[in-house]
Structure formats: structure tokens, C-alpha cells
Amino acid sequence: MNKLQTAQFRFDGRTPYSAKKTPTLVEPFYADEADRGRQLDALSSRMDQAQNQMHAHEKYGLVVLFQAMDAAGKDSSIRHVFKGVNPSRFRVASFTKPTKEDLAHDYLWRFWNKLPERGIIGVFNRTYYEEVLAIKVHPERLTEDGNLPDEFIKGLPALWKARYADIANFELYLHRNGFKVVKFYLHVAKEEQGKRLIARLEDDEKQWKLSDDDLKEREHWPDYMTAYEAAINATATPHAPWYVIPSDDRDNQQLIIATIMAEILESLPVTFPEKDDKEARRLIREIERQDN
């Protein structure tokens, strides 16, 4: 069994990301299902302890982004990786097609509104990267759904370059304000995705999740891979790196993500507030007085 070294999944701008050269499957980091469960429980406990310290410190926060093709495992990863984190210090925001109100604002507006407070882990299930992924694959949506002035739509290469810069600056701004940005791209093979989509169709409780529109979108797989590659390479930085997670094995996927999250939380320079024994004794006396 291989030792899990998280650096192999990290892209921070020093080396380019290539979709074709990056595996969607690696040797498992667990011996069997019981071992995987033990490891995940231990990582969950580490995350909760470190997040508790971050919450008490009240100066740092985490913004965790999940991007992937359909059926890559975003929901299940969020559910299993963060299962042990105190729910009062954890927020999940899921983003679908923008509303009329969203389109009346700049494209980052709806994401600004869901940023976490200090001491909180905020998870985005799909993110502002859709604006340089789905919209790049379907630029006609800029005119069909959006309110962007025509002058900015005419030169699409310049528009994408500007949006990469917007996003990179947004993440740098968060970093400079004590909010660490952690970005996960769940890299799944098209063939594996196909198996999972068929499994959905054969499951009475999940069949509703798939439609002809989803299959039409799947026809654009090569375009999406190109768009992901460009977006990751344009926005991967040391302060906001991308972690490209091999996702054909969901159990391995969750173990890798949990290890990365535990390491990042434990790396934050946070401490519990300094003990004040005198104040503690005073409060104990007050509690005892109330109970008498």
C-alpha cells in the first residue's frame, strides 16, 4: 500500500497541469474497506480538532471549492470528508444556474454573499469557475442569459483572460484577509462517468437526476477538459493552489481530500486563547452561587 503524499496532487503554478497526463486512478491508499474507514475517522477527528482551534482563534477562515464533471463525486466527498466537523462551524453553498437577480449583478456577486465568517469552513459545491468553464464551452449563454455589455462579448479570448485575472485577484484578496482558498478538481475518466450515469438510470431513486440535456452536455467532454486545463493553469498559485484528485475510485478520492484538508487546517498558525485561571475560578464561583 502506497503512502499518501498530498504534494503529488497539488498544482500551484510552478508546473503546468495537463488533463491527459494526469491520472484519474491511482493505487489505493488503504488496504481494505475497514482500513479506509479507520483512516477516514482519524482524519475526521484531526480536522474537527484543528477547526475547533481555528474557530477559537477567530482570525482565519477556509473557503473550499469543489469543481468537477457530473457524477465525479462532489456531493459524496463533501458528505463523507466533513462528517466529523462541528456543523455550527461549517457552511455548504451549492450553486446552479444563476437567477434573474444574480444576472442583474456582476458574476462574482452571488459567491461573495456566501463567503464564510472567520473561524468557519465554507464549502462551495460548484463555484465561480463555472464562468470560465460552462460559459466558455457555451459562450452563447453570455448573450442568451447574461446582461454583459456587448463590447465585452465581442473579444472572447480577452474576456476569458480578464476573468482568469478577476478570479486570481479575488482569491488573492481573500488570502490577504485571512481566508485560505482550497480548490479541488475531481478528475474522473469519461468511461467511469458513463458507468456512474448508467447506474443512476438503473436506480429508481436517482433516475430523476439525469435527462437528455445532461447527455447533450456530455458531448462537449473534450471542450470541458480543455477549459479545465486552461482555468487551472491560469489560476493556480502558491496561496490558492488547485488539488487535482484522481476520482475513478471514490473511496480513495475521499481519503485524499480528507488528508489534504487535515494538513491544511493543522498548518494554520492558530492557537486557543490564553488561559486565565483567575477568571475561570471567578466564573466557577458564579455558577456555584447560581446553583445554591
Image (spheres, helix red, strand yellow):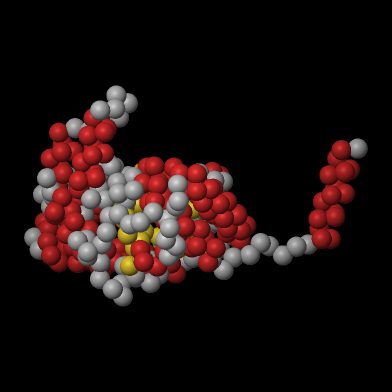
Q: x, y percentage for residue 187?
A: 28, 54
> In the rendered view, would you say 73 is above or below 226?
above
Q: How many marks?
A: 0
Residue 91 seen in render: no
The front one of 228 and 30 is 30
Q: x, y percentage for residue 79?
A: 44, 42
Quarter of the figure with residue 173? bottom left
> In the rendered view, would you say 110 is above or below 274?
above
Residue at image x 37%, y 42%?
75
Residue at image x 82%, y 51%?
283
Q: x, y percentage for residue 108?
A: 31, 55
Residue at image x 20%, y 46%?
191
The front one of 44 and 120 is 44
The front one of 247 and 108 is 247
Which residue is at the far right? 292
The front one of 62 and 40 is 40
Which residue is at the far top? 204
Q: Is residue 250 left or right of residue 121?
A: left
Quadrant in the picture for the N terminus: bottom left
Quarter of the figure with residue 210? top left
Which residue is at the far bottom? 14
Q: Is residue 254 left or right of residue 117?
A: left
Q: x, y percentage for residue 48?
A: 57, 52
Residue at image x 61%, y 58%?
53
Residue 271 seen in render: yes
> In the rendered view, would you say 202 is above or below 143?
above
Quadrant in the picture for the C terminus: top right
Q: Is residue 188 left or right of residue 144?
A: right
Quarter of the figure with residue 95? top left
